[in-house]
Amino acid sequence: MNKEFIYEKPFGILKVWFEKNNGSEIAPSANIMISINDEKKFKAHRFDATEGTIHLYNTIKLTINGKNADCAGFKIDNAKELIEIQNNLAAEYLQENRNRYINGESPIVVQFHDGEYLSAYTAYGIGAKLLEELGLASYISGWGTRVDNELIDTIGKLFTYTQALEYAKPALEEKERQQKEKEEKNKEVFNKAHETGERQLLYKYSDDCNDPTEDCSLDMVYIYAMPDGKIETVRQHTW
């Protein structure tokens, strides 16, 4: 149990704390738990920082000054603080889940999915996210995470994050090398723009025409390094 927050109310003592809900390993949450006068605890729905309230899932009966009253929530003076705590706890729980994979406590499991339009190896949850980060899988909208066949052929359908990282290492190092090379090249272009006082072409690419009033289907986009260190984008229609 995390730290309790205690509030004195007309009906007695309201206690609020958080408990971990790991129903989804990629989106764990910190449940809002409450108790009234140390009686049976139950889960609340959400905080509202604007109203300064805790909302319940269902109304409950309370006794105030000898009379029964229906209650759908409680006023508190630190709802914003509790929202921040709840979000921080959820982030901690997510990192705990990730660490179990990264440290090898939880293996990454890959399964073959025989779909109507696409059949391929897939992974789920944090295992899938980690493979995507390593460039070993890609998310396909409406289908799921597709894992590279070569990875499966090399290390199998059950493996640790360390094994996947080792497999991905050459590609990651090459990507890093290319990125550094690109940064050095861009730096040289910016230096030339500064020295000459004239803009210099960084790179160019083609794109769909962005002006529906023009009779063109393709634009050429030029990205320039400017003498003041800024970037300028020039778009030219083609006919």
Image (spheres, grey):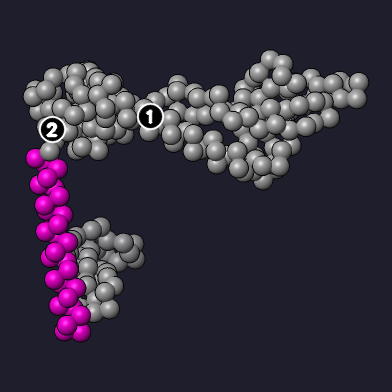
Q: How many marks?
A: 2
- Quarter containing the C terminus: bottom left
**Magenta region:** 170-198
Q: Which residue is mark 1?
A: 96
Q: Position of residue 93 (x, y in %)?
A: 43, 30
Q: Is residue 180 magenta?
A: yes
- Residue drawn at x 64%, y 19% is 42
- Considering every residue shown, the one lying at the far front of the view is 3
Q: Which residue is mark 2?
A: 166
Q: How many other residues sit within 10 Å of disc 1, few (<14), some (14-19) or many (≥20)? A: few
- Considering every residue shown, the one lying at the far right of the view is 66
- Residue drawn at x 32%, y 30% is 99
Element under label 2?
A: helix
Q: Please, is residue 123 above or below residue 166 in the view?
A: above
Dominant secondary-structure state across the stretch colored magenta: helix
- In the rendered structure, the answer to whether residue 114 lies left or right of residue 71 reads left
Disc 2 from disc 1: Cα separation: 22 Å
- Residue drawn at x 80%, y 31% is 9
Q: Is residue 18 magenta?
A: no
- Amino acid type at mark 2: Glu
Q: Quadrant of residue 14?
A: top right
- In the rendered structure, the answer to whether residue 85 lies left or right of residue 76 reads left
- Residue drawn at x 76%, y 26% is 13
Q: Earlier in the sequence, mark 2 or mark 1?
A: 1
Q: Position of residue 175 (x, y in %)?
A: 13, 48
Q: How many other residues sit within 10 Å of disc 2, few (<14), some (14-19) or many (≥20)? A: few
192 or 11: nearer the eye? Answer: 11
Element under label 1?
A: helix
- Amino acid type at mark 1: Glu
**Residue 77 appearing in the image:** yes
